[in-house]
Amino acid sequence: MSDFFTLASLVFVVGSGIRLATPMLLAALGETIGQRGGVLNLGVDGVMLLGAFGAYYTILETGNAVAGVLVGIAIGVAMGIAYAVITVTFGAEQGISGIGIYLFGLGVSDVLFQKLVGTPLPIRGFADWHIPLLGDIPRIGEMFFQHSVLVYLAFLLVPAVAYLINRTTFGLNLRAVGENPAAADSLGVSVPRVRYTAIVLANLLAGLAGAVLSIELGIFQQNLTNGQGFIAIALVYFGAWRPTGVMAGALLFGLVSSTVLQWRTLGIVSGAASSLMAMAPALLTIVALVVISRTVGQPSALTKPFDRGK
Amino acid sequence: MVPVAAVLASFVIGALMLLALGADPIEGYTALLKGAFGSPKALSHTAMKAMPLLLVGVGICIAFRASVINIGGEGQMIAGAILSTVVALNVGGLPPLVLVPLVLFAGAVGGAIWGAIPGALKAYSGVNEILSTIMLNLVAVQFMNFLLRDPIMDPAQKASGRIPQTERLSTNADLPTLPGASRLHIGVVVAVVMAVCVYVLLWRTALGYRLRAVGHSPDAARYAGMPVKRTIVAALTFSGAMCGIAGAILVFGSESHRFVTDGSSVGFTQSAGFNGIVTALFGGLHPLWTIPSSFLFGGLLVGAEAMQRAVQVPKALMVGLNGLVVVFVVTSEQFRRVLRERAERQVEEEASEAGKSSAKPDEVDT
């Protein structure tokens, strides 16, 4: 255990915790936008997988990491439009159709990977960017300011999404549509248009999250996300539908994961015990769900399709 | 009709995907159907594959009929597998006539516990069951990995190898094969019997009536004096029990007769916890219709392997197509409901219009 509490080890754990938190943070920020507009998207994990494969394959073929990110985003947008048609235009049950999207992404990303790539080859993403001055601070710089540009982007999106939800006209409409779509409609807000936008933004970020995952790992494989998309959904509840809360949750999950990994590397815990510890984030989420459901209410119209005629 | 159209639609999309991947769809689908239903051996494989889908599917029927969305089939299967394995490891000496029913019952209990937790959380704490069941899936996977890597790991593996699995479980717990069959075992019969039991439960018992009443309208059920909270817990408990039996059968009906993990839930369940949802939806959430439905989807999963060999398109395609089936079924059902309601409103409006227009001439006269 004393090996773990050395400065070098702690710095490493914090740094890799931030890295591990990044894809979950991006997906959860997207899901926050969707849920504030009253739409639950259980397909996040599937969209992430498709985005991850799209980015991986693009970089494998072209060597261009920026193109990879853009392809991940484009896949997210396409899936968002599809999901919006399903849940807004057709008003389908969101919980179940989301599982359909998940299975679709899980299967199709695997098919494409096996068919187009076969043997997993590593890709090169973005080099870590040492932020001038800040990155030079001993320890602190290593932990916070020597990451890939994608990590900075994800964390900059936290205030951006908070601003979007709380300070813009779109955000006002979004919250109105998520709480009381009938009232918003009577004030002339187009509920379908707001929800379409929210869903596309949510899936865009899910696609980006997948791209970041495969680019940071430098690899793709079957079921690469291993449930991270589902954890992202839980983070939204964990963070009580606020971007800062979501970020806190993502960091907590990232740090728990990196701590478990580090303990395993140092031989502090056995493989079996590390499985036991890997249960912690999910258990923590369940506890958080109990607390949240007693204190903060979810958006009132969450999962409820809006039918103007009623 | 709607589910059939949904399957056909997703197969059309599947054909386009096959074309895009440079494979001949007709050749692929022919191989798929032959591989699924073309020979006695294929049919036996299909029945084996259908068995967990059927059990999870009827479990899903119970939950969805009560308007409880159970996404936790994967975790509940693992919980059932764990408890039944622990029982077999401890009382493996019992005669088969006692031990086989006992391990299946233990599976049901394990799954029931894993279902009752999100049920109680929903009923008494207002926790969304979709999220809690997903989280409990993650917990179950890691708990399985923990147990198979240490407490119930095969002593031989502990010493030498690294495969996280149990020892060869007691032969007394092996599921007997059906007469005249080489691999087909009684798990298939158990699944069909359970489907009939669930039908009886839902439509011939007071509890089933309460489950459906709560599913239809919790407020009305509460007004009628029904214990809504307890009914919600019961829905997830029974739903979990069905998945738990499936988990136990996967262990004791496996060829290795061991409980093995590759670290993920898919490795153990083959995604039956999710595919069972597809099966139940295709069966119209009716336990008896879920029987042929499970046979169809089991066949597709088996046939996908034959298709992979024939046209070199990975069998994972079927998982993706199953996803499309789900999307199409829920989309078209909801769409039809909306259309029907609009039509009804229109009829009402026309009726009131007609009333007005018949009143108008009088006004003109006066």
Image (spheres, coloured by chain):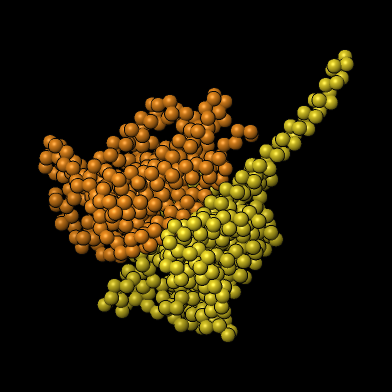
Q: Residue at x 58, y 84 (%)?
A: B179
Q: Position of residue A181 (x, y in %)?
A: 54, 32
Q: Is residue B168 left or right of residue B25?
A: left
Asked if one can make out residue A292 in the rendered structure from this viewpoint, the answer is no
Quadrant of the rendering where the C terminus of chain A is positioned:
top right
Q: Is residue A100 above or below residue B153?
A: above
Chain assigned yellow: B
Chain assigned orange: A
Q: Residue at x 42, y 78 (%)?
A: B256
Quadrant of the rendering where the N terminus of chain A is positioned:
bottom left
Q: Is residue A65 left or right of residue B313?
A: left
Q: Is residue B45 left or right of residue A113?
A: right
Asked if one can make out residue B165 in the rendered structure from this viewpoint, the answer is yes
Considering depth in this image, is A183 or B66 the residue closer to the camera?
A: A183
Residue farthest along the top direction in this orientation: B366
Considering depth in this image, is A61 or A229 the residue closer to the camera?
A: A61
Q: Is residue A124 above or below residue A162?
A: below
